[in-house]
Image (cartoon, coloured by chain):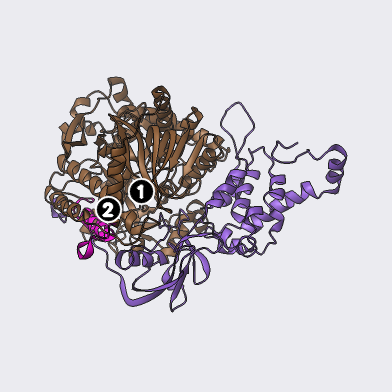
Amino acid sequence: MTDVASLPRAGQPEPESGLTGATLTLRVFKGVPGREQGYTTYEVPEVAGMVVLDALHWVQRNVDTELAVRWNCKAGKCGSCSAEVNGRPILMCTTRIDTLARGPITIAPLKAFPLIKDLVTDVSRNYETNKLIPPFTAAPDDGTPWRIPQMDIDRLYEFRKCIECFLCQDICHVNRVHELSGRFFGPRFFVRVASLEMHPKDVLDRRELLRERGGIALCNITKCCTEVCPEHIHITDNAIIPLKERVADVHWDPVRWLGRKLFGGGARAGAGPPQ
Amino acid sequence: MIPYTIRQCDVLVVGAGGAGLRAAIASAEAGCSTIVITKTLLGKAHTVMAEGGIAAALGNLDSPDGWETHFADTMLGGQLVNNWRMVDLYSREVIDRVYELERWGGLFDRTEDGLVMQRAFGAHSFRRLCHVGDRTGLELIRTCQDRLVHTAGTDVLMECTLTRLLTSGDSVCGAFGYDRNTGELMVIRAGAVVMASGGWGRMFRYTSNAWEGTGDGAAMAYQVGADLQDMEFVQFHPTGMIWPPGARGILVTEGVRGEGGILRNSEGERFMERYDPVKKDLSSRDVVARSIYREVAAGRGTPHGGAYLDIASRRSPAEIRRKLPSMVEQFASLAGVDITKEPMEVGPTIHYTMGGIRVDPETSASSVPGLYAAGEVAAGLHGANRLGGNSLGDILVFGRRSGEAAAEHAKTLGSRLPVSETQIADEQAAVLRPLAGDGGEKGENPLQLHRTLQEAMQDDAGIGRSEESLNRALAAIGELREKSARMRVPGGRVLNPGWQTCRDVEFMLTVSEAIVRAALARRESRGAQWRFDFPERDDRLSRVNFVVREKAGAMAVEERALEPMPDDVVTRLARSRFFDPAVLPSHYAGKVQALPAEAHG
């Protein structure tokens, strides 16, 4: 074993600086609502393997301490640093500069959400949407540990990987172009509902909620959400389409329609145990 | 004075990680109006970074496991300076907390029988970590988050920062802070405050911590007279990314080794066989981190100064993708490395703080009336070194306990204590000073001061320390504190990172000083504290914790005697497969004998 006394006094080996010698040009959106807004250009020394967020941190530390950026873990785990880089919604902490087209890099805030300042938008309506979705509810039982097949976990795990970066909410044209977010849960919350509806121990039925308040019919399966998801969740194929089928099954089935007409509309409407 | 808003609640919970959310649920379920305040958006707290799992002795795979064995592993991992009562409560109750989480909708991977799956982890005697893929922290926070927002009587203030606790007499009665997005100044009056603000790694250069790990909770508690304990114990996780430079410090889960991955040096040698022939690559984190450091110092490091972590030659690509999906993603996107084919380059990264606010084991009460603490900001459970999987358990067990105790305190208090206008005015002036615009040429940039502090702490108070290096760190902290009085930033209160960093820097200076002073006081090597000038363990220091507190305006370090384990508790230590009577300090010597190997199944 190495003799302790032979070790350096303190610290640990320094990494190489990694400077490539190149200079990057960033065009960064700056502004607050109701005042002058536009792009500011910054020149940043490139470091090997640099991600977009590294470049913005360099700007904050060395040029512009006022530049507002939302970030947290800087490891692709928390989903805070969403922005539109060269027009594409991405996480800035996992997007390497050397994967972008050469030339100036344009960085803008998410378009589908109200601007707060610079690259930061107000995403609070997502949290309001979540409150509308009845939470996980299991049937009462004797409390012995559950037995659940791994197959069920695998299916749900895909949905539970969601880090709530809201890139899917941003790219979805129902929100982005048609501004229908008040009538539309959006891809993130269809994934959320799917994770509840497909949980083998959950006993609620959220199909009427999806149809009515959630506006799931507004989705016309363009799959943009799936394309931008940093967790590679098959949002459209594995969450939205199966949910649409379930909604169609309960709402558009002619026999059930007749049943509702004859015996009243209360059956299976809203959240309640399945029959 | 600028007008400020006033909010009121029975219990104020500071932080929305697992501990804060679990505390808030407990407080609200006890009938108390509860506000959770968080610097970030809900669901982004550092808990999401936890990858490996929750350690709980369910015994689903290894039937000889039980809470007593978990107790023994945790005490031995902590080098016996843990608060044994906390470990006792923890190892019993964490089992219930896992099943509770499942009943709130949390997912866990399953055994063939459909029970909760458990994986091996460093220095745990048995396969014990309940997990879902390598995203257990995300699962925990999402489950608690959803539970909280559907619990009546709770309110969450997102993206708000607290800068000071308010006191009435000896008691905490609220806090002062601001909304990060609007700049609105606020006072929150509360019957009790639960500090659940997490740990602090951001004063070091290479850390797996998110930006918010600036030690606000410990610093604010210190300022109102709370005792901080075990501040010298800062955990280096052995495996952080080391290349590219921007990714340096990002965590590589211990789950890689839990799933069979091994460490090699540049000569291809599996060096952990040399440093810990029994536990090998799954030795405790302090041992593995030091071993990598030694290999690098001996010239057997990788090109970027670390070790190779190899899972590619040990498991099939399909298995790796299923059990470690986010590691596959992380190395592919950040380093351009396919871990199903190539080894990773890893090195130690600042990861976790064992120390923090000294608390009562049963109630999580601090030494200041009305102030409670749970999770990473609290001290005692982990001693000198935390075992992987014990943090997610910690936040559930003591999150719940602190929330219940704070609710009880708020209820018995009756009417809310008055807040002091003087305290509010003083704090407001202090918080706004960097915006005064009078710094001119001499104004200091808080982000640059932060970087300077990081260099000083990394170099001189890092994985290995000496009196000389610690004194250098102390001098740097003193110099930075002088400069910090002159921090000036342009702009206003609306979402201004420069301004927001000013108070972070002050908090980090306080906490850094506490780390350095405690590290100077503990003149021995134990767990995460590695002193080059005192490489051995000191038997006498097995009986004490070091406490840092404010005394007449200065930071004082005091020894506090540990409550020794009663004889019938000491004997539990033999339940650990890794128990070795030679590690016992003299006051426990002869009280426990090693069990025969077959007793461990």
Three-letter code for the amino acid on which mark 1 is drawn: Ile
Which chain letter matches label 1?
Answer: B
Judging by the rendered image, the residue that carries numbered circle 2 is B433
CA separation in Å, label 2 and label 1: 13 Å
Where are the magenta residues, as a range? B436-463
| Residue B335 placement: quadrant | bottom left
The percent position of residue A94, horizontal first and vertical second, equals: 44, 63
The percent position of residue B130, horizontal first and vertical second, equals: 47, 40
Question: Of the residues under marks 2 and 1, which one precedes in the sequence?
Answer: 1
Label 1 crowd (10 A; few <14 / some 14-19 / many >=20): few
Residue B562 tag number: none
Q: Which chain is brown?
A: B
Judging by the rendered image, the residue that carries numbered circle 1 is B2
Q: Nearer the viewer, residue B526 or A112?
A: A112
Labels 2, 1: one chain: yes
Q: Is residue A225 magenta?
A: no
| Residue B556 placement: quadrant | top left
* Image-based side of B244 in relation to A144, left or right: left
Marks 2,1: beta carbons within 8 A: no
Element type at mark 1: loop
| Quadrant that contains the C terminus of chain B | top left
Q: Nearer the viewer, residue A179 or B557?
A: A179
Q: Nearer the viewer, residue B428 or A5?
A: B428
Chain A painted colour: purple
Q: Where B120 falls versus B80 (above or below)? A: below
Q: Is residue B462 magenta?
A: yes
Q: Is residue B601 visible?
A: no
